[in-house]
Amino acid sequence: MATPNGTGAPAQQQLDATTAQQMAAVLGPDVASFEELIKALMSTQNEVRDQAEKVFNACKEHQADGCIQRLVHVLKASQQLELRGLCAVLLRKALCSDVENKTWNALTPQTQAGLKAELLELIKKEENKSTAKMVCDTVSDVGAMLLE
């Protein structure tokens, strides 16, 4: 089946310069900027949240490995419970919400293997029951996806 880009591969969303710069910043060496992006996704201000969603979706589409690795990092390391919970939900949605498993298939085999190991480790180490349940939901959905 041909796609709009004529290659047979799914067409990727074009990045504007601002989004590309923001994506480079949140996936750069400073992990705190990715955590700020996650905080912005919870903003009550529509404009802030919409921009954060645009950057997050661009990260997921164009730099899946970096995006997923950062989500896991914040899920493991953040002192803010609500951020850890949101990261668990975002991981589940990013990996399991589409029929074609685009994000999962975009990950390198090393990232896929590392993610599975990290999620299982998080189940054992997460002290907050609510967040642990969200991680379990993610593990369950990823497992079901892989069995299909």
Image (tube, rainbow, N blue to C red):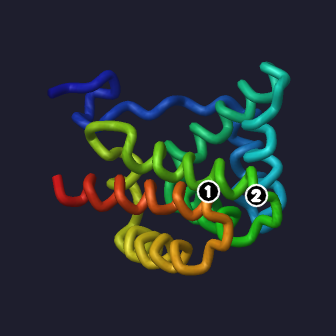
Number of the label disc, if any, that sits on residue 130: 1
**Residue 137: x, y in percent?**
44, 55
Question: Relative to 5, does residue 38 appear above or below in the rendering?
Answer: below
Can you name the residue that lies furthest to the front here? 129
Residue 122 position by quadrant: bottom right
Q: Which mark is residue 70?
A: none
Residue 94 placement, left or right of 105: right
In the picture, measured across the screen, residue 37 lies left or right of residue 76, that is right
Residue in the foreground of this view, choosing between 3 and 68: 68
The residue lying at 78 percent from left, 52 percent from top is 25
| Mark 2 → mark 1, Cα distance in angstroms | 9 Å
Task: Name the quarter where the N terminus is drawn.
Answer: top left
**Residue at the (47%, 50%) spot, across then down:** 92
The residue wearing badge 2 is 81
Residue 28 rendering spot, x and y as whole percentages: 74, 61
Residue in front for this viewpoint, 139 or 132? 132
Q: Find residue 114 and report its image quarter.
A: bottom left
> Is the C-beta separation of discs 2 and 1 under 8 Å?
yes
Q: Which residue is depicted at the point 67% across and 65% down?
A: 128
Q: Residues within 10 Å of mark 1 (few under 14, many from 20)?
A: few
Residue at 54% in and 58% down: 68
Say what amino acid the circle numbered 1 marks. Ser
Residue 17 in picture, x, y percent from top left: 72, 33
Provide the secondary structure element on which disc 1 rests: helix
Q: Which amino acid, mark 2?
A: Leu
Query: Where 102 falls versus 17 (above or below)?
Result: below
Foreground of the two, 143 or 64: 143
